[in-house]
Image (tube, helix red, strand yellow):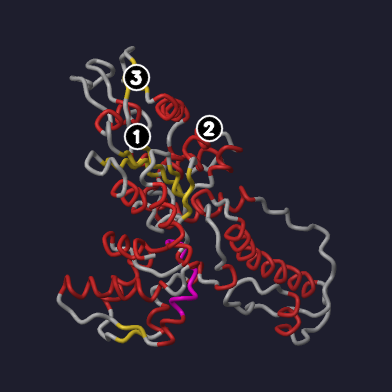
Amino acid sequence: MTEISTVKQRFGIIGTSELLDRALEVALKVAPTDLTVLVTGESGVGKEVFPQVIHAFSARKHNKYIAVNCAAIPEGTIDSELFGHEKGAFTGAVEARKGYFEEADGGTIFLDEVAELPLPTQARLLRVLQSGEFIRVGSSKVQKTNVRVVAATNVHLQQAILEGRFREDLYYRLATVPITVPALRERKRDIPLLFRKFASDVAVQYRMPAVVLDDSARELLMNYYWKGNIRQLKNVAEQISAIEPNRTISAEVLSKYLPEVVRTPSIAGGGFSQSNDFTNERELLYKLLFDMRAEISDLKRMVGDLLQRAGGAQPCEPQREVKALLPSVAPHYEEPEEPIYAETEEVEEEPRERTKADVQREQILRALRRNNGRRKEAAAELFMSERTLYRKIKELGIEE
């Protein structure tokens, strides 16, 4: 435990969660070996610190550490970036160039968002992991490299395997030692500590008093869902520090910076979220129920109109009757503008059952509309990479 405390101080890791300590403990135990490590967890939980810990406590600590964001490299050039290329291998290759695996020989390479690698590149990576061999783009010469690979992803790789987007043999090579980083909502006691750290950093940087949360704000902060995890919490702390004139923050003030659509303590459960591909069942269920509320309201209004035109029943305490029928779906329920009638006729046509693809399509279309079709901003809003958003648009047949 003392060693874990030392690691936290050295790498600026804040928190006392048992799940976090367990993840760090696994990282420290595997560090002296050369085993491949796969770090999983939601977007924004701080996965990038674990490869640094592993490298710093390994025998390779005096050699190179290279971090590569696989989602940020265009598909057409990623093989060249990872494995290098020869002069004239493609247009613009005016000279030979070493790739990251060649540069990191003897050290550690961190492949962030490894699930975004194209399938041909996955095959090349598998060969490196199996034999340490690779071939530069445009060359026929086999070269050797001795690197320690640590990969990370926020995608549920088992689901990606079933969908044919990730190689199963590569998954088992990467996940020799798996490390799961807990979501922020699984570390409730750590949330006020992290907020205080981020607020203090802003105060020091801009020479202003640090904001302080009162009890009600602290309670709200701890019970919020935090879809964006630590990254979102830091963003909120910085916004409040810069904008609010009052340095004591209440729940009423804090709530202005927390989007209503994702605030729900009832689904703030544990486990690894697969939000980037909308495969987290809890998130999908919430989105589905949230949208069903609007459909039920429209259906009630339609029935009321039909009864009015047919000279049907008189209104009879509509609000109480309707509330008894409606599921408790969202934190707030908007009362219908038109009267609802207690005596209703059966509606023969039932709405079509919504599928997971329907929910995904609607969420993507809404994000694109809100951002005027700009994919980069829409992808950031949906907490996914631009490449993943592009792939989803093609898979779901979305016409922008």
The amino acid pointed to by label 3 is Ile
- Magenta stretch bounds: 220-228
Determine whether the residue tagged by mark 2 lies in a helix, strand or loop.
loop
Tell me residue 245's x, y (percent): 25, 84
| Residue at x 26%, y 42% (from the top left corner) | 65
Task: Indicate whether 23 appears above or below 188.
Answer: above
**From what the image shows, is residue 195 above or below residue 74?**
below
| x and y, in percent, of residue 190 in the image | 41, 72
Label 1 amino acid? Answer: Pro
The residue at the far top in this view is: 140
**Residue 74 numbered mark, or none:** 1
> Does the magenta portion include 225?
yes
Where is residue 215 shown, x and y percent of the image?
41, 87
Disc number lying in front (3 or 1): 3
Q: Is residue 299 left or right of residue 204?
A: right
Quadrant of res 265: bottom right
Q: Amino acid at mark 2?
A: Arg
Q: Where residue 135 is drawn, which disc sits there? A: 3
Q: Which mark is residue 167?
A: 2
Mark 2 or 1, closer to the camera: 2
**Pointers 3 and 1 in contact (C-beta within 8 Å):** no
Compare residues 114 and 282 and report the one nearer the observer: 114
Marks 3 and 1, how far apart at CA: 19 Å
State yes or no: residue 366 in magenta.
Answer: no
